[in-house]
Amino acid sequence: MKITDIQTIEVIGHGYSTYVRIYTDEGLTGTGECIHGRSASPAIINDMKEMLINQDPMNVDRLFEMIRRAYIFDGALAGNVISALSGIEIALWDLVGKATNLPVYQLLGGKFRDKIRLYSDCGGSMDNPESCGKKAKEVVNMGFNAIKFDIDDSKNPYKIDAWNWSVTPGEVQSMVDKVSAVRESVGPNVDIAVDMHGRYDTSSAIRVAKAMEPFNLMWLEEPVPPENVDAMREVKRSTSTPICAGENLFLRYGFRELIEKQAVDVIMPDIPKCCGLSEGRKIANMAEIYYIAMAPHNVCGPLGTIASCHVCASIPNFLVLEWHWLGRKHWDELVITEKPVIENGYITLSDKPGLGVEINPEGVKKYLKPGTKFFD
Ligand code: MG
């Protein structure tokens, strides 16, 4: 089997997704989704196409590494080049699954679990503790047993200014009030994560992490920016609140120091953005030997989310996968499905070949980036 063509489409969902379709001389196709590369992704994928034409699509890891090394002078350490390559890699796995009549999780070594637990992001900072508590209850009533809130609020009246990364006592108290209202609303058995988006300095992060200890959080996310691993480790060592980071890191190399220094309790690679499925599994395996759990970041539509689920199924140290489409009604429209993709806060993996799901042309066409077209 030989690759004969690669095409992309641009779809607006929660974010800017690029879908990649790989065509072969045997008529089989594979489709992937990558995220966060904006209009760079289709351009980069089109540029990579030349290297892939006439290649055997069955050699997924080899093709990934061939392109990564070829683009090393063009930015392949991290960023848009890797996001584009991740979309290609996911499409290759879908294709190989169809060619072998096996689900992708089987090709990744088999599954530890049939159902993948999701947490729902509950949206940006709510105005007040009452609205946070109410929103948390609504989401738990949808079936989710894990939720996430943002607690960094640029409009907080107690903030010093928009640029200073020091937390004030008033700001800490308003964070505590919100998380307290959420814990009270959902009870003791729901997992709660809170995100600070790396917008605080080290001593501020430690103050917030310690203030969160009574609420038994699933994690506190990026209390400091992820690039200073020693600062992250200092926060982690100062508190019993679990610390999570990594949504903007790329490849094993990007996670190496964070994992080796045991600077976090949980890592959160965004698989369709930072690495693809094979590399995602390798990152999880690195984390596993340090007893670090993996909870992938994810803002993809159903195709990219299900691609991430295949990795989540194939690793022992999976904790929970993000879902970030609350309030966006077209989630189920984007794929061909007889039942909702998410049921009671879980995705059950299909045993169909490849990713086990196909995009729905009619649904997807409604959400194409204006002025762009669907696959030929
Ligand atoms: Mg985050």
Image (cartoon, grey):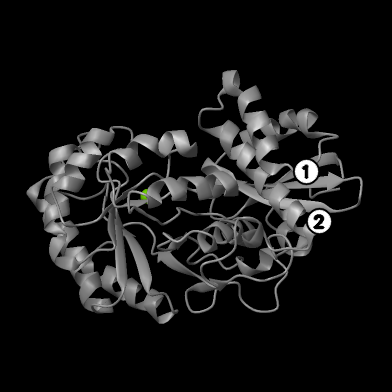
Q: Secondary structure at mark 2?
A: helix
Percent from the top left, x then y, of residue 220?
A: 26, 54
Q: Nearer the viewer, residue 159 or 21?
A: 21
Q: Residue furthest left?
A: 169
Circles 2 and 1 in contact, beta carbons < 8 Å: yes
x 57%, y 35%: residue: 82
Q: Is residue 322 left or right of residue 227?
A: right
Percent from the top left, x then y, of residue 108?
A: 61, 55
Q: Amino acid at mark 2?
A: Ala
Q: Secondary structure at mark 1?
A: loop
How many C-alpha atoms fall within 10 Å of the one at disc 2: few (<14), some, or many (≥20)? some
Q: How many marks?
A: 2
C-alpha span from label 2 to label 1: 10 Å
Q: Nearer the viewer, residue 365 or 314?
A: 314
Which of pointers 2 and 1 lies earlier in the amino acid sequence? 1
Q: Amino acid at mark 1?
A: Pro
Percent from the top left, x then y, of residue 68?
A: 61, 29
Q: Which residue is mark 1?
A: 57
Q: Is residue 182 left or right of residue 286?
A: left
How many C-alpha atoms fall within 10 Å of the one at disc 1: few (<14), some, or many (≥20)? many
Q: Is residue 35 above or below residue 177?
A: above
Residue 38 at least partly seen:
no
Disc on res. 99: 2
Residue 106 at least partly seen:
yes
Q: Is residue 364 above or below residue 187?
A: above
Percent from the top left, x then y, of residue 327?
A: 49, 67
Residue 89, image quadrant: top right
Q: Is residue 195 above or below residue 340?
A: above
